[in-house]
Amino acid sequence: MGRKRLITDSYPVVKRREGPAGHSKGELAPELGEEPQPRDEEEAELELLRQFDLAWQYGPCTGITRLQRWCRAKQMGLEPPPEVWEVLKTHPGDPRFQCSLWHLYPL
Amino acid sequence: PLISMLHRILRKGTYIIWGCGAPRGKHGFSRQYSHIYATRLIQMRPFLENRAQQHWGRGVGVKKLCELQSREKCCLAGTLFKSMQLQPSILKYIHPDDELVLEDELQRIKLKGTIDVSKLVTGTVLAVFGSVRDDGKFLMEDHCFADLAPQKPAPLLDTDRFLLLVSGPGLGGGGGERLLGTQLLVDVLGDEGEHYSAAHVSRVILAGNPLSHSTQSRDSINKAKYLTKKTQADSVEVTKMLDEILLQLSASMPVDVMPGKFDPTNYTLPQQPLHPCMFPLATAYSMLQLVIKPYQATIDGVRFLGTSGQNQYGGSLGDPGPTIPDTLGCYPFCKTDPFFFPACPHTACLMNLPSLACQSISFSGFRAEYHDLEGLGLSL
């Protein structure tokens, strides 16, 4: 019989981007601008940690936590960035922060 | 055979032991070994660059592989990888086509040039001088290894002190001769008429393989359990003998027992101490210490390092285990390479080798002093 034609069929198809915690249902409008800022800050912090993982000066990043890697670099006198330690200190127990970029892979 | 060596040391005092037990974290052995190599290079790089400058002049620049310019003479520092067709045994299967590759933190490059490939092993950290050619290989003109770390001068003493090293008693094998030899040693030490009496011996170090290889009876391991239920392993009787001998020794002087290749402890390095339950009699004395291998201690102010003959010193005494973890098993450490010794020992001993030899080594400004080795009947 065929589907009834909807008005939205004439719109271009755009893939919906999946949110960080799987919020595919759509987001509520930001309340007075408070919501997106912490998320942006968090994103920036995660990005800082990812860059720390990829920095070759401090040795391999797989198989150890970021804190362990930072402490190792400090002990060897490689002067790792103190901002990384600050970020790690403020999010203890959160695997997105504490574990390396590839911790979910069996490396 | 029973090998004992008397080495002159220094005044009575306290001693410190450096130990490195394998951490029992949740990772176990699932971690990559790359951490050991990376930390080894980081730790040894300053020594290497220092040596390179001494060797080839202050002006020589140590470059990274990514900074190489074609045909420009420069110095590179990194870890060696030897591509061997006939592995796994690196001693037995040397092939003329073995290739050397130098790896730094980011890249690797093939090496060519006048160098004795058979003398080098994977895992050695070294600096090379030369230039990269059009074929992409680095033509080596010269090379050098990291120098030994600075050595703190040993304190002076007023009396002669001795360290007794007993390597490979191998009890339980070859009839009663081994036991006779070991018992003789104990009697000599106890004898008060001896010129170098037991009072001058600071420490006895039993350097591995107190139990003979033959006590590891393969038959009982391969047989079915119901056949071996009532039989006792050979090593049990021998361990009781060893316990009695250690009891006699540790009653009068400090004794350290290092594990050996054939002993009931782990295979990987660093080998963990033998368990105290093996020596119920001797462990009653606090002078008995069960230690790890490799073993480092400061005895009367003198730094002593004992390792087994399995290690290969790839040209640098600062790194006694370059082949770890390639051919010698090891736990995947991540914080440091535990076999890199930043402080230079005064005496280093490789135990359980087929024959005895002594050598004094001098390095950057420290001249070796020959302490009457001829008087003791030992040759260089």
Image (spheres, rainbow, N blue to C red):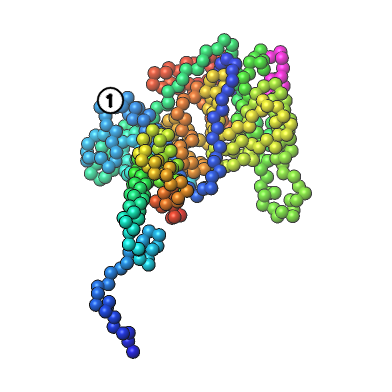
Name which quarter of the figure residue B161 lies in. Answer: top right
**Residue B184 visible in the current orientation:** no
Name which quarter of the figure residue A33 lies in. Answer: bottom left
B331 relative to B244 in the view: left or right: left
Vertical position of residue B273 compared to residue B371: above or below: below
Q: Nearer the viewer, residue B228 or B48?
A: B48
Q: Position of residue B346 (x, y in %)?
A: 50, 22
The residue at the point 72 percent across, 25 percent down is B248
Q: Residues within 10 Å of mark 1 (few under 14, many from 20)?
A: few
Identify the chain of the residue marked 1, using the numbered disc in the image: B
Q: Position of residue B379 (x, y in %)?
A: 53, 20
Q: Nearer the viewer, residue B85 or B29?
A: B29
Name which quarter of the figure residue B247 lies in. Answer: top right
Mark 1 sits on what residue? B58
Residue placed furthest toward the bottom:
A1
Vertical position of residue B187 compared to residue B65: above or below: above
Q: Position of residue B127 (x, y in %)?
A: 34, 33
